[in-house]
Amino acid sequence: MKQWPLSNLWKKLPEQVRRLSILGIILVAFFLMIRSLLIPSDFGKFGHYRASAVEEIASLPMQYAGQMACVECHEETVTLKGKGYHKNVACEICHGPAAAHTRDPGSVKLTAPRGRGYCPICHEYLPSRPTGFPQIVSNSHNPMKPCISCHNPHDPKPPQTPKECSACHGEIAKTKSLSHHVYIPCTRCHNVPKGHKISPRKFLPTKPSTREFCGGCHAKGAAGEKGIPQVDLATHGKRYVCWQCHYPHLPEAH
Ligand code: HEC
Ligand code: HEC
Ligand code: HEC
Ligand code: HEC
Ligand code: HEC
Ligand code: HEC
Ligand code: HEC
Ligand code: HEC
C-alpha cells in the first residue's frame, strides 16, 4: 500500500499534538469560510474600505449649511457675532444642523439653547482646559439666572468690568487667602496693566522673575516687618528660582 509521505511523521507525533493540529486546521478553515461569506466583494478595491461606501455617504442628504448661508437672512447676527468672542464658534454648533431651515425657514424652525445647562459644555471650569480659556464654576457663577440674561450669546462680553482679581482668578485668590501670603496684595508681586481686566489676554501682567524679588522681604537683613522668616539668599536653594520649591500663592516651608 502506498504511504502518504508524511504519514510516518504524523504517526510519530504524540496523540495530544495530533488532536491540537486537527483543531487548528478546523479553526483556520472556519475562519476562511466566515471571511469569504461576510466581507463584501468590493472591499479593498481602493484601500482598506468598501468601495461603494464612498457613493453611499456622498448620497446622504446634507444636514449642515455653513455660516455663509445665514448671511442672506440674518445679516445682523452674523456681523455682530463676527466681531465678538464667539467669532470662531459656528452658528450651527448652538442651533443645530440648519440646511433644511435655510431652504424653507417658514416650516423648519431651529431651536436656541436658552437654558443654563448648555453654555457650561464649553465654559465649565476643567483643569485640563487651557488656562487662558474663559471658564466659570456654574454652581457659584450667578446661579439660577439663565446665562443669556447677562451675556448676549452672539456677543458674550461680560456685562461689566470686574473689579477684583478673584472674579477671574478665583482658584488662586482662594488658595492665597489661606496662605502665609494672605495679606500681600496681588499687585505687590504682579504689575497689572489697565487693559488686563477688559482684554486679559492682550494686556498681560508681569510675574516676578528673580530670586532677589522674594529676597526683598525674605533675605537675611532685609528691612521689613518683624516676623517675616528670612533665609540666606547666597546658599538657600541656590541655582533655582524660589517658586520651583515654594508655590508663591501658598508658600509652605514646614
Ligand atoms: C432664507 C432665509 C433664511 C436663511 C438662509 C436662514 N434663516 Fe434662520 N430664520 C429665517 C426666518 C424667516 C426666521 C423666523 C422664523 C419664524 O419665527 O417663523 C428664522 C429664524 C431663525 C432662528 C430663530 C429660532 C428661535 O428660537 O427664535 C434661528 C436660531 C435661525 N433662524 C438660525 C439660522 C441659521 C443658523 C442659519 C444659517 C445656517 C439660518 N437661520 C438661515 C430665515 C432664514
Ligand atoms: C453660543 C451659541 C450661539 C451661537 C454660536 C449662535 N447663536 Fe443664535 N442664539 C443663541 C441663543 C442662546 C439664542 C436665544 C437668545 C434669546 O432668546 O435671547 C439665539 C437666538 C438666535 C436667533 C433668534 C433671534 C434673536 O436674535 O434672538 C437667531 C435668528 C439666531 N440666534 C441666529 C444665529 C446665527 C445666524 C448665528 C451665526 C452667525 C448664531 N445664531 C450663532 C445661541 C447661539
Ligand atoms: C462650542 C463652545 C462654546 C459654547 C457652546 C459657548 N461658548 Fe462662549 N466662548 C467660546 C470661545 C471659543 C470663546 C472665546 C475664547 C477666547 O477668546 O479665547 C468664548 C468666549 C465667551 C465669553 C467671553 C469671556 C471673556 O473672555 O470675557 C463669554 C462671556 C461666553 N463665551 C459666554 C457664553 C455663553 C453665555 C454661552 C451659551 C449661550 C456660550 N459662551 C457658549 C466657546 C463656546
Ligand atoms: C447675573 C449676570 C450673569 C449671569 C446670569 C451669568 N454671568 Fe457670566 N459673567 C457675569 C459678569 C459680571 C462677569 C465678569 C466677571 C465677574 O464679575 O464675575 C461674567 C464673566 C463670565 C465669563 C468670563 C470668565 C473669565 O474668566 O474670563 C464667562 C465664560 C461667563 N461669565 C459665562 C457664563 C455662563 C456660561 C453663564 C451661565 C451658566 C453665566 N456666565 C451667567 C455675569 C453673569
Ligand atoms: C476679566 C478677567 C480677569 C481679571 C479681572 C484679571 N485677570 Fe489676570 N488673567 C486673565 C486671563 C484670562 C489670563 C490668562 C492669559 C493666558 O493664560 O493666556 C490672566 C493672566 C494673568 C497672569 C499671568 C500672566 C502670564 O504671563 O502668565 C497674571 C499674573 C494675572 N493674570 C494677574 C492678575 C491680577 C493680579 C489681577 C487683579 C489685579 C487680574 N489678573 C485680574 C483674566 C483676568
Ligand atoms: C508673593 C508674590 C505673589 C503674590 C502675592 C501673588 N502672586 Fe501670582 N505669581 C507669583 C509668582 C512668583 C508667579 C510665577 C510662578 C511661576 O512662574 O511658576 C505667579 C504666577 C501667577 C499667575 C500665572 C499662573 C500660575 O498659577 O502660575 C497668575 C494668574 C497669578 N500669579 C495671579 C495672581 C493673583 C490673582 C494674585 C492675588 C490673588 C497673585 N497672583 C498673588 C507671585 C505672586
Ligand atoms: C511683601 C513681603 C513679601 C514678599 C515680596 C514675599 N513674601 Fe513670603 N512671606 C511674607 C510674609 C509676611 C510671610 C508670613 C510670615 C508669617 O508666618 O506670618 C511669608 C512667608 C513665606 C514663607 C514661609 C511659609 C512658612 O510655612 O513658614 C515662604 C516659604 C515664603 N514666604 C516664600 C516667598 C516666595 C517664594 C516669595 C517670592 C515669590 C515671597 N515669599 C515673597 C512676606 C513676603
Ligand atoms: C531647592 C528648593 C528651594 C528653593 C529654590 C528655595 N527654597 Fe526656601 N525652603 C526650602 C525648604 C526645603 C525649606 C524648609 C527647610 C528649611 O528651613 O531650610 C525652605 C524654607 C524657606 C523659608 C522659611 C524659613 C524659616 O526659617 O521658616 C523661607 C522664608 C524661604 N524658604 C524662602 C525662600 C526664598 C525667598 C527663596 C528664593 C530666594 C527660596 N526659599 C528658595 C526649599 C527651597
Image (cartoon, rainbow, N blue to C red):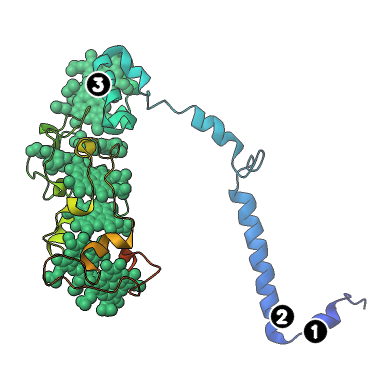
Circle 1 sits on which residue?
11
Give the quadrant of residue 33. bottom right
Residue 1 location (% of width, % of height): 92, 78
Which circle's residue, 1 or 2, is located before the other in the chain?
Answer: 1
Left or right of 220 on screen, residue 173:
left
Q: Which mark is residue 80?
A: 3
| 192 up-or-down from 216: above or below | above
Q: Residue 24 is drawn in which quadrant?
A: bottom right
Looking at the rendering, the quadrant in which ligand 7 lies is: bottom left
Residue at x-position 34% and y-position 31%: 88
Is 91 left or right of 15, judged from the image as shown? left
Q: Is mark 3 within 8 Å of ligand 2?
A: yes
In front: label 3 or label 1: 3
Task: Give me the C-alpha separation between circle 3 and circle 2.
Answer: 78 Å
Q: Which residue is mark 2?
A: 18
User: Residue 159: where, in percent of width, then height?
Assistant: 12, 32
Q: Residues within 10 Å of mark 1 (few under 14, many from 20)?
A: few
**At x 55% / y 33%, what residue is drawn?**
54
Q: Residue furthest top?
A: 72
Badge 3 or badge 2: first in the primary sequence: 2
Which amino acid does the dot numbered 2 rest on?
Arg
